[in-house]
Image (cartoon, rainbow, N blue to C red):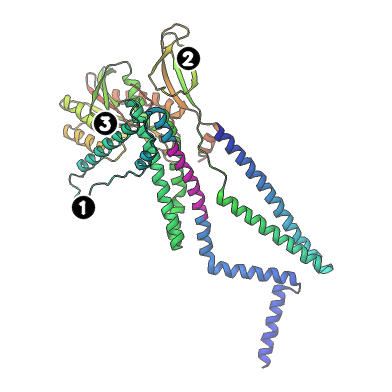
Amino acid sequence: MQMAWLITAFNSQVLKSQFGSDPFSVILNLLFYVIFIAFIFYGQRIQLYVMLREVEGSLYKLKFIKEEGRKVAIETIKEIGKPPTDPTARVDRFLEYFTIAPQNLDPAGIVWKLEHILDVRDVRLKDEVKMMAPVADETQANNLENTLEAAMALNFIYKVIRHFYLLGKKTLSLYVIMQIQMLLPMIMREAEAYASALKAFAFGQPIGDGAGALVAGKLMHGYETTKVQKDCVFATVPIEGRTVYVIKAEGPGGNVGKPGDAIEYVVNENKGKIATIIMVDAAAKLEGEEVGEIAEGVGAAIGGPGVDQFKIEESTLKYNIPTNAVIVKEDIGDAVSPMRKEIFDAVDKAIERIKQVILERTKEGDKVIIAGIGNTIGIGQ
Amino acid sequence: MSQEKTSTRATKMSSVVLLIIFITLALALAALILASYEYVSDPFVAGFLVLIGILGLALSAYVILQMRRHGPRPSIEVPPIMTTIECKKCGYKNIREFQRGDYIFKEGEPCPKCNEKTMVTAIYREVKEKDKEKERSRV
């Protein structure tokens, strides 16, 4: 009994020292404990709501960018294509367009299946653009196609983020919302890059990805060009006593062509007697690296779904042709937005590097292929 | 251009609202501190101050939450794109804003100096020094 009284007295002393005698500090202390306990039990839930709010803010911004993309696409079609009817419904249908990748359970021959699907997609998109903008010439139609593709990418990004946001809200799962919240800064950067690409495509301005095409354009300018399949051109240019076949996508419309086919054609035309292939392309830089830095290496420098890289590797392997690569470094934002001055200036440095490779790796009288890879929008030849 | 103006106005508006919120927040905190001093001499005034303080805190928290929900209207920045036109014969050079239809290697209007055809030699955008500094790494 005495023991119990002692404990109660001790507890009341402890409580007194904890809370003090002042009722105001008692309230503050109690409030502190309530908050502390609430955080123990509901901390994760609070964190979830904070994350949801963050995603909601970005989703709001993405919605604005997506709507802006759609608006730019419709306005450009109306301005350039002069369609007889309002193209809005057709544009909305276009934005929902999808492509199903080939089945890869048995990967043998998948490249050709993928190429076929990409060809069908390309033809379909070109037809759609022609119907939307009947007055547009080939260059304008290519630019419109690129504009619509950028709008399509923005629409897709918005829908994926909205899906995860709503799923997270519905399930109240921290892990569903956490994965999208963690990726959000990178996704937003990509969306912002596409947003600035929209205007570049609509106006036909050169983009950062066109660095390789600009290198080739500068090398072949003033020489006679020959069209090769598909949407590519090549010119025979004498450089340092060598015969150089310079290849690029046909500009100035937004176009990447099929450099794989063009290289294969030139290699076969010369019966494999090519001393080296030099590929020039814009490549993703790592954070901390300078925009427009030039680097050199070996291998087929080409992005995209991989069909062209596969074809180039097949051709070079067949005739044992060494493939060299010169890259211009830039980040994703620079690659799809109007070409930065640093990238434009880097083109001359890339040409110097190419000439150095030619001098070091080939002999006088040799035949060389230089392939400028990338979207040639706003770049002629 | 009008979009840029709207975005500037929105930024100004939000900074004014933020200033008001911070003043309210400071006043609310001051009221709570005063309440703790006033409690011994006049509990009624202290209670009144606590009420004002809590109301002020709640109001500022609510406005901040509302602002975060809607946020300022985002805008897509369109950087100025420059086109360089050169005459290969006399070296005449002109840099002007990009116009639809310009492309690199496009033969343009006749040279004002020698009447030879000019050519578009460059189309690019310049990034502000401030943005370049942000990109640069110190390591």
Q: Give me the C-alpha separation between circle 2 and circle 1.
A: 59 Å
Q: What amino acid type is highlighted by mark number 2?
A: Lys
**Percent position (x, y) of residue B109?**
43, 13
| Residue A41 in the image, given as x and y percentages of width and height | 53, 69
Rate crowding at label 2 as few (under 14), some (14 to 19) or many (20 or more) other CA atoms within 10 Å.
some
Report the Cα–Cα distance between label 3 and label 2.
34 Å
Q: Residues within 10 Å of mark 3 (few under 14, many from 20)?
A: many
Numbered disc 3: what chain?
A: A
Q: Chain of mark 1?
A: A
Residue beneath label 2, please? B93
Which residue is pictured at 59% across the width and 34% down the height?
B5
Residue A105: image tag: 1
Q: Which sits in the foreground, A127 or B48?
A: A127
Residues flagged by tags 1 and 3 on a common chain:
yes
Locate residue A312, reporting x and y percent. 23, 34
Residue A129 highlighted magenta (yes or no): no
Q: Outermost residue toward the front?
A: A85
Amino acid type of disc 1? Leu
Range of residues picked out in magenta: A53-71
Going from N to C along the chain, the mark reached first, 1 or 3, is 1
**Label 1 to label 3, Cα distance in Å?**
28 Å
Q: Nearer the viewer, residue A314 or A205?
A: A205
Amino acid type, label 3: Pro
